[in-house]
Image (cartoon, grey):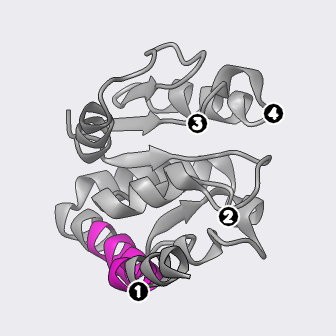
Amino acid sequence: DPRRIASFVNCMPSIACWPTLLVYRAALPEFDFRVYGIDGPAGNLHPVQAIAEAMAGSMFGWHDKEHGDGFGHVLHNWAAVGRPLIGHASHYRGRMGEPLWQDLVTCLDLDQRTDAENVALIRAIAAEPDRHAEMCRAIRRTFDELVDWEGEAAAARQLLET
């Protein structure tokens, strides 16, 4: 469904950011909100390929999580499949995942506007396929700039050889 907004934050209904998601879900009834993961109403998906397919089949990744180490494996997975984020960029400020939070480039940073303004922006981006596609490409480009698979593999080989 192209109008899907999905979250893969484990235990989402139990964390402080859950009420924010509920506000947006109520304000955007034309969107299909899915919350996967541990304790998520949509449950866990298996195997990993099913997670990637559900992410790629979403218009936005709802990633609003104020706790954690700031690396963001789920955050990076959203970037790898090229889906713009919705959430509070401040949760990642000064942390490894921060570069993925570029307001109106790779994400919609809820910190920047009122809820009503953000709801209008979500609708506007959804109504402009070229704008949405550019955000998808931008977050994937940012991911490619941050992740060096070959370099990491070489470093792992070197570590194992010593």
Give the CA separation, mark 4 to mark 3. Answer: 12 Å
Task: Name the kind of residue labelled 1 in the image.
Answer: Gly
Say which of marks 4 and 3 sits in front.
3
Residue placed under numbered mark 2 in the picture: 89
Which comes before the other along the chain, label 2 or label 3? Answer: 3
Instruction: Give, as a single range, the part of the protein colored magenta.
Output: 136-152
Tell which residue pokes out farthest to the front in this image: 162
- Mark number, residue 85: none
Relative to the observer, which residue lies in front, 14 or 44?
44
Task: Assess disc 4: are there few (<14), some (14-19) or many (≥20) residues with their C-alpha within 10 Å of its C-alpha.
Answer: few
- Specify the quadrant that holds the N terminus: top left
The image quadrant of residue 57 is top left
Say which of marks 3 and 1 sits in front.
1
Q: Residue at x 71, y 60 (%)?
A: 70
- Specify the quadrant that holds the C terminus: bottom right
Residues tagged 2 and 3 counted as in contact (Cβ below 8 A) = no
Say which of marks 4 and 1 sits in front.
1
Count of numbered badges drawn on the protein:
4
Residue placed under numbered mark 3 in the picture: 9
Secondary structure under tag 4 reads loop
Relative to the observer, which residue lies in front, 5 or 50?
50
Q: Residue at x 73, y 37 (%)?
A: 17
Relative to the observer, which residue lies in front, 62 or 69?
69
Task: Name the kind of residue labelled 2 in the image.
Answer: Ala
Query: Is residue 129 shown left or right of residue 105?
Result: left
Give the CA separation, mark 4 to mark 1. Answer: 37 Å
Residue placed under numbered mark 4 in the picture: 16
Give the CA separation, mark 1 to mark 2. Answer: 28 Å
Which comes before the other along the chain, label 4 or label 3? Answer: 3
Task: Assess disc 3: are there few (<14), some (14-19) or many (≥20) residues with their C-alpha within 10 Å of its C-alpha.
Answer: many
Secondary structure under tag 2 reads helix
